[in-house]
Amino acid sequence: MAKLVYTRLQDHPHETYIATSGSLIVGRIDCIFAGPAAAEKWMWGMQLDIGATPYRRGGTVGSQEEAVDALEAAWSSWKSWAGLQDSNGTQPTVASIAAPTT
């Protein structure tokens, strides 16, 4: 899968980013309380309804960097769960599965 790209929504009242991998929308990061660094609050969320079982993760953290780190970790976890791995290009590759022995 391709690396996550964060695009800021310009017409949103808060600082908001959409995270994509290729053409797949992976998640979102929102500043839910702007202020001094110690008081900032950021929300991150990831929802992938690909296949039979939805994969949803999210939380609230104290900085934009923590939100990015949490979303990146959830993305990495989802790729492992889905049996995918990063490739050198932008196309996904499926992790090899050993054929059953008879």
Image (tube, helix red, strand yellow):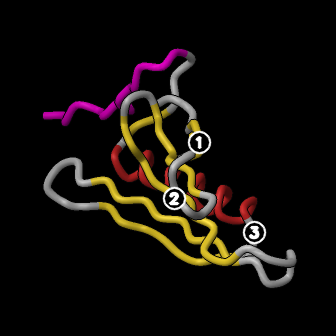
- Amino acid under label 2? Ala
Nearer to me, 22 or 76:
22
Magenta stretch: includes residue 90: yes
Q: Which residue is drawn at 31% across and 53% down?
A: 48
- Classify 30 as above or below 25: below
In this image, 92 relative to 42: left or right?
Answer: left
In the current view of this chain or complex, which residue is farthest to the top? 89
Marks 2 and 3, how far apart in space? 17 Å
- Amino acid under label 1? Tyr
Please give the residue where the numbered disc 3 appears in the rendered image: 63
- Give the x, y percent position of residue 21: 46, 35
Q: Mark 3–mark 1 contact, CB under 8 Å?
A: no
- Classify 5 as above or below 82: above
- Magenta span of residues: 89-102
Q: Is mark 3 on a helix, strand or loop?
A: loop
- Classify 76 as above or below 5: below
Provide the major secondary structure of the magenta segment.
loop
Mark 2 surroundings within 10 Å by alpha-carbon count, few (fewer than 14), some (14 through 19), many (20 or more): many
- Amino acid under label 3? Ser
In the current view of this chain or complex, which residue is farthest to the bottom? 39
Which of disc 1 and disc 2 is earlier in sequence?
1
Please give the residue where the numbered disc 2 appears in the rendered image: 74
Magenta stretch: includes residue 68: no
Please give the residue where the numbered disc 1 appears in the rendered image: 6
- Classify 62 as above or below 24: below
Marks 3 and 1, how far apart in space? 15 Å
Which of disc 3 and disc 2 is earlier in sequence?
3
- Give the x, y percent position of residue 102: 13, 34
Depth-wise, is mark 2 or mark 3 nearer the camera? 3
Q: Residue at x 57, y 56 (%)?
A: 16
